[in-house]
Image (cartoon, grey):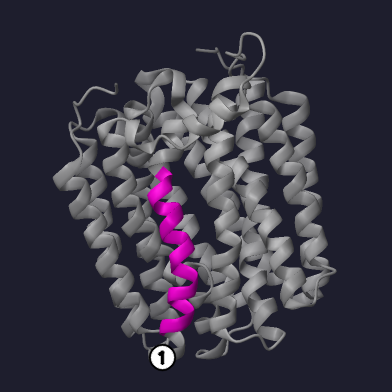
Amino acid sequence: MHKIRSSEFAALLLVQLLAPASFTVFNIALPLYLDSLGISIADIGILFTLASVFYVVVRLFVAEYSDLVGRKLFYVSSILISAVSTGALAFSARLSQILAVKAVRDTASAAFWTTSYAMAGDKVSKAYRGRFMGLFDSASTIGGGIGLVIGGWLAYEYGFFDTFLIASAALLAAFALSSLLITESRESRVKGKLSHSRAIRKSMRFARAPYNIKALALSGFFLLFGFQLTESFILPILLSTEFGLDAFQVGAIFSAGWFSAALVYLRSRHLADSVFSLKHLYVSGLIVCALFTMLMAFAPNPFYMALFWTAHGAAFGVIGPASSKMVLNFAREKNRARDMNFTRLGGDIGIILSGVTAGSLAQLFGMRPIFLLEGVLIIIAALAVLALVREHAPTS
């Protein structure tokens, strides 16, 4: 366990604001950019699906290698590669170019999220994990919300070219901060020559993961499959085409959900350290989230869509710290990044399937029924946690 300095803590939080802000500028601008190019919603779904494959594969390897040789190299490199690929999107106008850029960006994003949470977990004691990870989640969410507002406004005022370049510049600032102020959280465990073949084999040993890690992975499949059905591109395109909102208004509605989640994180992070059952706190948040998601299918105007989306975000604010603490508690210390990544493996597979599923369903049935399907999938995720997770099971 490393003692974290106040300057390093501040740097971690600042990077956790800047990087997600830049990611969500990309996320809100990209579907609108693709729509402006006249690309069909089914093709957009295929693009998001293909790019997500790289995300899943890279997470497996980065998790294992960061447990073995340390996290900082992967952490800072992921931010730099994200900056370069986001800037490259400004010069991409063909579907094949955009797919290549998004694949690289998703690869770097996978490495960032894998190492950032593992690094934070390395640096905080078990007694305060709920509070610290709640702050960490809150910083990510506030950054994401800021990025949504700024991304929508930049796209509306200055166009997509400038928007992607500004997001790239913010990531370069995060790269400088992380390189200079954040120290390595884990020394190398490799003695002698590193066996890459052995590391690769270990990165795929999901069957040997702790029981609760596998249970959370199954739940995560349904949760992320459902959530990404609408968040990745269906909701912004629906707001733009059905309600006639411009990019700034779409970003503002998206950010309302993210900011509500961040505000609730600040309160629920204390609850995660004091509540008797993290599992029941997590499940309660999922059920509320599912109900508001289903209501979004019937929103008659942008006001109600924004209201339901904001309530949906607040429910996620309850889920976040409870989820982060459960994962850290269930993960084995020597394999923390690998086990944390295994909990996300089901969700990653769900993300891969969600893009093409959402595009196809929207083409056949329209966009609104997808919110009902998402709600059902979130309820299944909640039932999986309730039935399968054993809060006091050993980690090994």
Report the residue at 58% width, 29% height from top. 197
Seen from the viewer's position, the closer of residues 107 and 27 is: 107
Report the residue at 80% width, 44% height from top. 172
Report the residue at 34% width, 41% height from top. 323
Left or right: where 287 falls relative to 342: left
Is residue 211 placed above or below 280 in the rendered structure? above
Seen from the viewer's position, the closer of residues 385 and 13 is: 385
Kind of residue sitting beneath label 1: Leu
Write down the quadrant of residue 154 in the picture: bottom right
Residue 279 pos. (x, y %): 22, 40
**Residue holding disc 1:** 364
Q: Is residue 238 magenta?
A: no
Segment tinted magenta in the rendering:
344-361
Is residue 372 placed above or below 151 in the rendered structure? below
Residue with the most extreme top position:
191
- Identify the secondary structure beneath mark 1: helix
Is residue 118 placed above or below 252 in the rendered structure? above
Residue 67 pos. (x, y %): 54, 24
Q: Does the magenta stretch include residue 345?
A: yes
Seen from the viewer's position, the closer of residues 1 and 292 is: 1
Residue 243 pos. (x, y %): 51, 89
Is residue 123 placed above or below 99 in the rendered structure? above
Seen from the viewer's position, the closer of residues 143 and 286 is: 286
